[in-house]
Amino acid sequence: MKIIFATQNKGKAKEVKAIFANSPFKIISLYGLGNEIEIEETGSTFQENSFIKAKAIFDIYKEPVIADDSGLEIEQLDGRPGVYSARYAGENCTFDDNNLKVIEELKKFPEPHRAKFISYAVFYDGKNRIETIGELHGQIIKEPRGTNGFGYDPIFIPDGFDSTLAELSLEEKNKISHRAKSFQKLKEALARI
């Protein structure tokens, strides 16, 4: 079954395609379709935003869609950046801008800086709607480390590790990440419909 992944993020698409690699589902991202659709995420939760994206793409293509909304929640920042993770440092900001803003805001707090990544994944085909969630707990560090991954990966050390997510290989990250957990659950649920 062909499924469109409602994302323009190449890093995210690579991760999810790897999760679905040995399955009957062929994942095609929006950029893989040559589509530059930008979907306004107007929801106040990861759950709302993931469905907004899935429904918007389904309404255009009338084909099964998966989508997710994910982000970082930091305890000392009262859950920020949360649903604003991608644009935390402002519109058109870079991953580095976001990381620097988080590091700066955490300077006034004692370590450790406890945090978690959350991924809310959804499948929608016009009649079936399946939703799953994945979390990865860890802490934020003061200096970015590593060149793998994207987003906040260089400043996030998962519990039980000494390396940041950006220092892990894609294979290692896909065994533990919030996105891996939510999409693995989604893949298993899709196999049952």
Image (cartoon, helix red, strand yellow):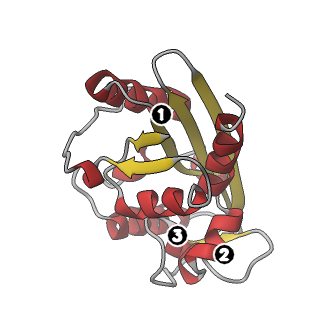
Residue 192 coordinates in the image, percent (x, y): 72, 32
Vertical position of residue 73 compared to residue 3: above or below: below
Residue 140 is labelled as none
User: Please, what secondary structure does the residue beneath circle 1 have?
Assistant: helix
Residue 128 as seen in the image, left or right of residue 7: right
Q: Earlier in the sequence, mark 1 or mark 3?
A: 1
The quadrant holding residue 160 is: bottom right
Residue 83 coordinates in the image, percent (x, y): 47, 40
| Alpha carbon distance from label 1 to label 3 | 21 Å
Q: Earlier in the sequence, mark 1 or mark 2?
A: 1
Residue 19 coordinates in the image, percent (x, y): 59, 59
Amino acid carrying label 2: it is Glu
Residue 17 coordinates in the image, percent (x, y): 49, 58
Q: Residues within 10 Å of mark 2 (few under 14, many from 20)?
A: few
Q: Which residue is mark 1?
A: 50
Q: Residue at x 33, y 55 (%)?
A: 89
Q: Residue at x 34, y 24 (%)?
A: 62
Q: Nearer the viewer, mark 3 or mark 2?
A: 2
Q: Which residue is mark 2?
A: 172
| Alpha carbon distance from label 3 to label 2 | 13 Å
User: Please, what secondary structure does the residue beneath circle 2 have?
Assistant: helix
Q: Nearer the viewer, residue 102 or 129?
A: 129
Q: Give the mark count.
A: 3
Q: Are marks 1 and 2 in contact (CB under 8 Å)?
A: no
